[in-house]
Amino acid sequence: MVLLHCPTQDNMAKRVAIVGAGVSGLASIKCCLEEGLKPTCFERSDDLGGLWRFTEHVEEGRASLYKSVVSNSCKEMSCYPDFPFPEDYPNYVPNSQFLDYLKMYANRFNLLECIQFKTKVCSVRKRPDFTATGQWEVVTLREGKQESAIFDAVMVCTGYLTNPYLPLDSFPGINTFKGQYFHSREYKHPDIFRDKSVLVIGMGNSGTDIAVEASHLAKKVFLSTTGGAWVISRVFDSGYPWDMVFMTRFQNTFRNSLPTPIVNWLIAKRMNSWFNHANYGLIPEDRVQLREPVLNDELPGRIITGKVLIKPSVKEVKEHSVVFNNTPKEEPIDIIVFATGYTFDFPFLDETVVKVEDGQASLYKYIFPAHLPKPTLAVIGLIKPLGSILPTADTQARWAVRVLKGVIKLPPSSIMIEEVNERKKNKPSGFGLCYCKALQTDYITYVDELLTAINAKPNLFSLLLTDPRLALAIFFGPCTPYQFRLTGPGKWEGARNAIMTQWDRTFKATKTRIVQESPSLFASLLKLFSFLALLVAIFLIFL
């Protein structure tokens, strides 16, 4: 890995302002340095990490997490493509270790010298000569002093988990409630639930986590959901991490070649193999469009032991109780937690630059405002792939930086606007998974699209001839981020080895006791026949 350094002041490289030093901001700094640009990152807090930096108190303008947060994507699937997690890290990483990893990444590539901490971005405005230069005036505030600087480009990396969505108008009687209520953003520790009757509204990952945590201390816990959800465990087939089994190029190709109803049937069958969601009151009402599954290893156990009770939506809130729809009985409640999600905006940008409507912005490839005459502003990380945001943001930044540098030319505005409008319509193709929410997209398909644009997508047919072991690992194995830096600009020399040893690092974290396994004749024969079948399949492909 090459050490990167911020260009000196006398360098004529393009100056790039980066807003935010979270996972997307760090990737953007590094990609700018790789391409010889001069990044300056403005971070309003006193440290890097964004969402992954736990604080006891909620900080304005910054994502907030609770003490017990663990990654939903395993370490092999959620690392930066050229910087694996330490091999002794657990497969699913607690937030404190995740932050340590981000600091290691920043130190390894000398990113800290490009970051100005405790600096708030007040405004980002087009210069009067923008149509000719594409430049921006960035006004910042640090220690009470405002400063203004001119930049050739801007990369916005502020995420979408900063503005809590609290729809109190949808809960009649909430103003009469005598207990305590708050948004999940404010939750830090479960102690507040001790011996209380708790209602959690919203069954996303945060809501489910909070309900499960509360159930260990509370007198009673209700989890209210309008539409239900699929719940899966981090521990998947044979104990493997769920995403290393689910996220493969082979499975993705297979899913996308099948009609959506068949894919939905297969998904439902797979999800119900752990437990029957209908029997637990969890089965999604809309099984045509896929919403993000809930990752929780404990929920079924808490439901079956009566510690968590699944309820429909809330009909009415009273002084000391709530009434649920379709259930006339009043349930006494002391605390209500609204896990109702987030909205996002860009307070430092004018609406003529990026306008947020219906939970999404008009961004080409989820990155560039389609209408700007000069493509010199990019939004990184404003996307919800069914996969990790770190490798997604890294790939976005690699592509965006080459656009900012002028190496890649974007299509005319009319074509980009048309594509953005088509995406907003969210018309089902009839094949593969159908996503129901704004910003959701197919992880592998989206990343491959960007990789193709920078000539960095692995060529499987070529690899089959030159390196068949690697080709098979890429296609049939987990789509780990190392694949994204295997070739093209920003190529990492260690990518092949990282791919071939990914399972070693996965098992090292769990095999903390060595067990002697006796060889099985049946297993050996099965492996032999599987290998022969694979050879026949490869032969038929080229027949």
Image (tube, rainbow, N blue to C red):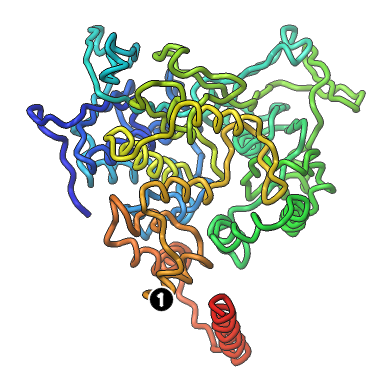
Is 115 placed left or right of 509 in the picture? left
The amino acid type of the residue labelled 1 equals Leu
Badge 1, how many Cα within 10 Å: few under 14, some, many 20+?
few
Q: Is residue 318 visible?
A: yes
Outermost residue toward the bottom? Answer: 521
Q: Position of residue 355 (x, y in %)?
A: 51, 17
Q: Position of residue 410 (x, y in %)?
A: 40, 34
Q: How many circles with numbers are drawn on the protein?
A: 1
Is 229 placed left or right of 92 in the picture? right
Q: Position of residue 473 (x, y in %)?
A: 47, 69
Outermost residue toward the left? Answer: 10
**Closer to us: 351 or 246:** 351
Q: Residue at x 30, y 32 (%)?
A: 404
Q: Position of residue 462 (x, y in %)?
A: 41, 69
Q: Residue at x 53, y 77 (%)?
A: 542
Res 488 → quadrant: bottom left
Res 237 → quadrant: bottom right
Callout 1: SS? helix
Q: Quadrant of the C terminus?
A: bottom right
**Closer to us: 405 or 244:** 405
Q: Residue at x 48, y 32 (%)?
A: 364
Q: Is residue 439 above or below residue 129?
A: below
Is 491 placed left or right of 261 in the picture? left
Which residue, given by chain and number where applicable, does mark 1 sit on? 465
Q: Quadrant of the N terminus?
A: bottom left
Q: Is residue 369 above or below residue 499?
A: above
**Closer to us: 21 or 440:** 440
Is 101 placed left or right of 517 in the picture? left
Q: Is residue 120 visible?
A: no
